[in-house]
């Protein structure tokens, strides 16, 4: 099944487009830090760096693309208002960028979205419409037509990708000799940005996208040779549970030779609490997928490989974190039980 909102892929995002995005973003977007983790480097046998996009405005990298896209609106489009569809981080980013631009924003979100993401989107001034997951796109399309709103895509858009690419530029400036970059993939916005940035700088770096096993949109797209739409997605990493892979995002992954891997939800939870315990980084599940690929052995690298993980966001509420903690505890107990020697018969 083909993906919705198919763009006209006119080639990958270029160096001039990224430079223009940098000028547009200017001081409105934070340059987030890249830190080195000595502890995780020792544990994993690689030289590990972490790009902390959870310190960005709205708590994720999404602010970059949303700000850049909304900055392109004409006066007529600004007066019409904007609409988007998102499980949370893009929702907050559009609401934040629209408020700064004086533009009315409507956001269609799944009724099971993380409550703090819903609350934050409303706090930024957007009208939030909650609807069951299967009706997200029809609801958004109906409201867009009825109200004559401008659609701000979550990922399949040149300005969104160019905005995300500014994260890649910063990372490559901070760690110019990086060998491998890992990042979680939903619809493909951030991985496309990283690929475009590396291509623009002619950086010899492997870029590996990581998806949950329950939301393999980009992985399946690569296998099938075209962007696909998933009939069902299920993952604790709501930020990676996009039901389709963007057409332009797929083109970046294909043409710029990204590698795609998948990880289990259990691996994501373990990585999530490792980031908190070992580094004091309050990431959300989607942001831990990159580390999960290393910790679980899905991605194996030679000793000393210089690796960067993009910690894409930190929007998770306390109740959800407690649920994930219980999942991690039960998984650990099950693993310990499986490792115990069998009890002798009759004892």
Image: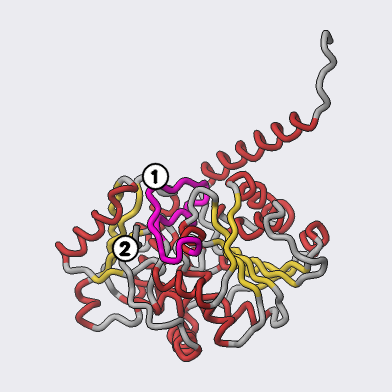
In the rendered view of the protein, which quadrant contains the N terminus? bottom left
Name above or below for residue 199 compared with residue 314: below
Q: Nearer the viewer, residue 59 or 332?
A: 332
Residue 330 image-quadrant placement = top right
Q: Residues within 10 Å of mark 1 (few under 14, many from 20)?
A: few
Q: Secondary structure at mark 1?
A: loop
Residue at the disc numbered 1? 112
Q: Examine the rendered structure and indicate whether residue 343 appears above or below residue 318.
A: above
- The total number of labels drawn is 2
Q: Which residue occupies the extreme front position in the image?
A: 224
Q: Position of residue 81 (x, y in %)?
A: 24, 70
Front: mark 2 or 1:
2
Magenta segment range? 222-244
Residue sitting at 39 percent across and 66 percent down? 154
Q: Earlier in the sequence, mark 2 or mark 1?
A: 2
Residue 346: percent from left, percent from top: 83, 8
Which residue appears at 52% of the width and 51% of the height?
A: 237
């Amino acid at each position: 099944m083909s993906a919705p909102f198919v763009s006209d892929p006119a080639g990958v995002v270029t160096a001039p487009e990224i430079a223009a995005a940098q000028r547009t973003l200017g001081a409105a977007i934070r340059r987030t830090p890249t830190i080195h983790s000595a502890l995780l480097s020792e544990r994993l046998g690689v030289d590990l760096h972490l790009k902390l996009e959870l310190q960005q405005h709205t708590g994720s990298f999404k602010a970059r693309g949303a700000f850049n896209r909304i900055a392109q609106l004409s006066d007529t489009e600004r007066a019409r208002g904007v609409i988007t569809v998102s499980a949370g981080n893009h929702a907050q980013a559009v609401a934040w960028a629209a408020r700064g631009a004086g533009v009315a924003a409507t956001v269609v979100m799944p009724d099971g979205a993380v409550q703090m993401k819903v609350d934050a989107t409303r706090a930024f001034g957007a009208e939030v419409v909650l609807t069951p997951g299967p009706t997200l796109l029809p609801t958004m399309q109906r409201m867009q037509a009825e109200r004559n709103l401008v659609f701000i895509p979550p990922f399949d858009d040149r300005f969104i990708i160019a905005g995300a690419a500014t994260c890649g530029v910063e990372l490559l400036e901070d760690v110019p000799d990086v060998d491998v970059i890992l990042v979680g993939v939903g619809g493909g916005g951030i991985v496309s940005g990283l690929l475009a940035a590396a291509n623009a700088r002619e950086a010899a770096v492997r870029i590996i996208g990581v998806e949950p096993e329950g939301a393999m949109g980009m992985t399946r797209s690569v296998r099938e040779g075209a962007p696909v739409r998933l009939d069902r997605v299920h993952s604790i990493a709501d930020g990676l549970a996009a039901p389709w892979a963007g057409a332009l995002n797929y083109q970046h992954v294909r043409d710029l030779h990204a590698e795609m891997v998948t990880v289990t939800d259990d691996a994501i939870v373990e990585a999530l609490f490792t980031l908190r315990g070992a580094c004091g980084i309050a990431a959300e599940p989607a942001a831990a997928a990159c580390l999960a690929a290393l910790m679980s052995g899905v991605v194996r690298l030679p000793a000393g490989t210089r690796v960067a993980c993009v910690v894409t966001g930190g929007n998770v509420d306390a109740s959800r974190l407690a649920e994930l903690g219980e999942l991690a505890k039960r998984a650990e107990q099950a693993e310990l039980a499986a490792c115990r020697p069998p009890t002798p018969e009759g004892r």
